[in-house]
Every structure is written in C-alpha cells, then in structure tokens.
Image: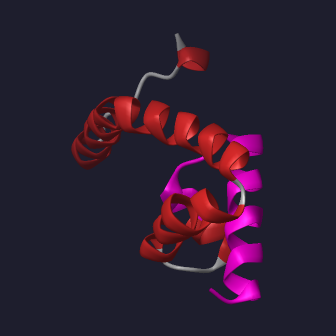
Amino acid sequence: MNTFSEERAVELGKYIVKNRVTVRAAAEIFGVSKSTVHTDITDKLKEVDPPLYLRVREVLDVNKAQRHIRGGLATKEKYLRLTGVEPITPDKR
C-alpha cells in the first residue's frame, strides 16, 4: 500500500466519525468515488488504524440501518415536489 492512500483512509475515517456522514457524503467532500471511500475505510483503514476502523464501522452500521428511512423520505419529497405540494417539515407544522 502506498502512503498517500493510507493517509487518505485515516483522514476519511476521522471525517466520517467526527461528522457521522455517509460514504456518499464523504466521497463528495474528498472528491473521490464512493468505491474509493468504501475500499479505504473497510480494507486499508482496518490494517492501518484498527481502533479508528471500529469507530467508523459503528457509523457505517447506523447509516446502513437507517438508509431505507432516508430513501423513503427522499422519495416522498420528490413526489410531493412533482405534484406541487410543499413537504411538511418540523418547522412548518
């Protein structure tokens, strides 16, 4: 493994743990693909910094458990926008 990818894996791991973001969000911030982020934080980080890997794994597990909810909400908002109905947000109740 080269040093650059190891450093990137650690930086990605720290960012994901600190901000509790998804792989997609981290990829956008770091300007790399989702596949690169996933490879870095699951394979490389496990070898480079195991304690950080475990903390990242916790965030990824939470994100995976919640993704069906986020997807459903996104779909609902999409169809509300298409029909011209404004979505109800907690601030607009």
x then y, percent, for residue 87: 40, 30
Residue at x 65% of width, y 38% of height = 55
- Residue 66 versus residue 93 in the image, above or below: below
Asked whether, in this view, residue 42 is left or right of residue 20, the answer is left
- Residue 19 versus residue 58 in the image, above or below: below
Asked whether, in this view, residue 82 is left or right of residue 54, the answer is left
Residue at x 77% of width, y 75% of height = 7
x then y, percent, for residue 59: 56, 37
x then y, percent, for residue 18: 77, 42
The figure's colour scheme reads secondary structure
Is 61 or 25 nearer to us in this picture?
61
Is 43 or 64 nearer to us in this picture?
43
Picture quadrant where residue 30 is located: bottom right
Q: Does the magenta stretch include residue 55?
A: no
Q: Give the range drawn in magenta.
A: 1-26
Residue at x 62% of width, y 63% of height = 47
Picture quadrant where residue 13 is located: bottom right
Task: Say whether residue 86 is visible.
Answer: no
Residue at x 55% of width, y 16% of height = 90
- Residue 32 versus residue 9 in the image, above or below: below
Q: Is residue 3 magenta?
A: yes
Is 45 or 25 nearer to us in this picture?
45
Asked whether, in this view, residue 52 is left or right of residue 57, the answer is right
In this view, the residue farthest toward the top is 93
Looking at the rendered structure, the number of numbered marks drawn on it comes to 0
